[in-house]
Amino acid sequence: MSERRSVLEVSDVRFAYRDEQPVLRGVSLQAAAGRLVCLLGPNGSGKTTLLRCLLGGLRPSGGSIVLDGEPLESYSRRAVARLLAYVPQFPSETLGFPVRELVLMGRFAHGGALGLASRQDLEVARLAMEMTQTLPLAGRTLSELSGGEAQCVMIARALAQQPSVMLLDEPTSHLDIRNQLQIYRMMRRLAHDWHMAVVCVSHDVNLAARFADELVLMRSGQVRAAGPPGQVVRADVLKAAYDVEVELVDRGEGRPPLVVAS
Amino acid sequence: MSADEPELRASVTGGRLAGWLVGGAVAALAVALACSLVGRSRVWGDSFWTFPWAQEEVWRIRCFRLLVAALVGAALAVSGLALQGLLRNPLAEPYILGISSGAGLGVLAGATLAVKLALPAWATTPVLAVAGSLTTAALVYAIAQRRGRLDPYVLLLSGVVVNVFNGALILALFVFTRPLDLLDYVAWSMGHVQESMYAGSLLPPPVLAGGAAVLAGGLLVLWRGSSLNALALGDEVASSGGVAVGRLRIEIFVLVCLMTAAAVALAGPIGFVGLIVPHIGRLLLGPDHRRLTVVCAAGGAVLLMLADTLCRLLAEWLNVGTLPIGVITALAGGPFFIVLLRRRFREGAA
């Protein structure tokens, strides 16, 4: 495991909004190709702010973010987009674009004049839609889809960027359990079979523990615990992070324990 | 990949875009020809096919008016489309956001300055028109933005207020300096294609310069069409997909100001064209900004050519000197705006 190359290296990143308490107080984490990392932590622990820093929307006041060996700020927007893709929590209003056009928008950073789709763009988009099982939806608009389908389309769009790193912001927060499972399976496949570094902000400790290769637990703008699920999903660790009594229900050999807040 | 799997096709291709371009140009030319032939005086003599026509000069003046109307219509329609795409606000339009009135202030200031300093109008008007529209756009944007986010209704309201303010300045400037005749001023302030600009040539310098600005602006908006498409996903996702959102905003605002300044310099502030044409285009052809740029340019040209011809016919029929084209676009566009506003209100969209 240790010889895996980190495509995204976050070291001691600090951030504060103007004249306010710091939101990030020196966060470090690595995302390696082929690994699914889930970012856990209570509301206000700085997960979203960290994500914004990784997306380039916020500029950290200290520390460094290194993407594929180069500092993040040395890339142009287009160059970042060829390495790092983002799936938001909620798909936005999309003005009636059909699904296939939304996915093709993921080719923007690869595209040439006028963003007209080349044969290769169409092929990449088709593969992304096949992977996310959205090909049958190609002609529909987002407003005609269920929440789960819409989220799959957003993942397909991000995949069309052919990134090395995928960032997802609570992609399952508004989905039913069946769709939650589907999205987590998909993320694991992207890491294990497509060799991407997948970083997912999550509120579901159990799903994260079941699917992730690594958990990063944040609180008050710092990383409190990081490592394989077995090291992080412990009653004392979770209690310290979330401020609630936590009960772990053993589910037998080889399966992570079930976390119940009590 | 199974054999029966549908192949993925893009809905906009280079070939189709070229098709729309040619189709739009042909349609606009056909409308122009038809419009140039109607009117009280018959322009051809004993035979339609014998050249030169009996009243070729009358026909040429009509063609000149149509050319100006077409340029202005294309500029305003593409400007409206670009603003709506950029701001994700279907009610945005250069007239409503006050950009036209800023350009108008610049045009009038240019005319005043030209009179006072005995300069030719072309030396002062274009620069001041662009400066006026840019200043106004920056002001409206500054009022409506907070931490880089724009509130759609604050944007519209600040446009309204800035419009009133610019209107007062325009009126004051006119009253104190009188750079043009009162009737000309009234017609100009409503939006009006002046025949007086025609001096034997279809392409006098103002039209040539305005045309160049419109052509350049339109092509650059077309070039940025895929960026505007990507903005449909929201600023954050568009930016993560490679769109330099901040730079795009500045580019689009500058292009819109340039095209609007050209339109206002040529025919005064004409409202609602930038609202009506993109909406009909979206309704018929969907949301793609590359296709819509081409279609709106042609549609705006056609709409204003028809409106100007209607003005000309009405003026002939009513025996009045001129009927400003802005009267017709405002009478048609006002209700259109209200319908859109109501629909958006009902949908609860912010």
Image: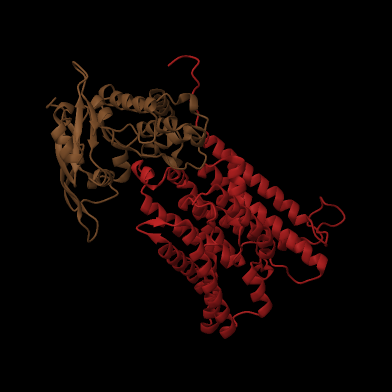
Chain colours: A brown, B red
User: Which quadrant of the structure image shows residue A75?
Assistant: top left
Q: Is residue B122 visible?
A: no
Horizontal arrangement in the rendering, residue A150 relative to residue B35 (left or right)? left
Where does the N terminus of chain B fall, quadrant-wise? top left
**How many numbered discs, if any?**
0
Horizontal arrangement in the rendering, residue A113 relative to residue B198 (left or right)? left
Q: Where is residue B114 in the image (x, y as percent from the top left)?
A: 53, 79
Q: Position of residue B82 (x, y in %)?
A: 50, 52
User: Which quadrant of the structure image shows residue B76?
Assistant: bottom right
Note whether B332 is above or below B349 in the view shown: below
Nearest to the observer: residue A166 or residue B7: A166
- As drawn, the residue found furthest toward the left would be A2
Q: Position of residue B273 (x, y in %)?
A: 61, 57
Horizontal arrangement in the rendering, residue A14 relative to residue B143 (left or right)? left
Q: Position of residue A131 (x, y in %)?
A: 38, 23
User: Which quadrant of the structure image shows residue A105?
Assistant: top left
Nearest to the observer: residue B267 or residue B230: B230
Q: Is residue A218 visible?
A: yes
- As drawn, the residue found furthest toward the right would be B46
Note whether B33 is above or below A262 in the view shown: below
The residue located at (18%, 35%) in the rendering is A238
Note whether B286 is above or below B43 in the view shown: above
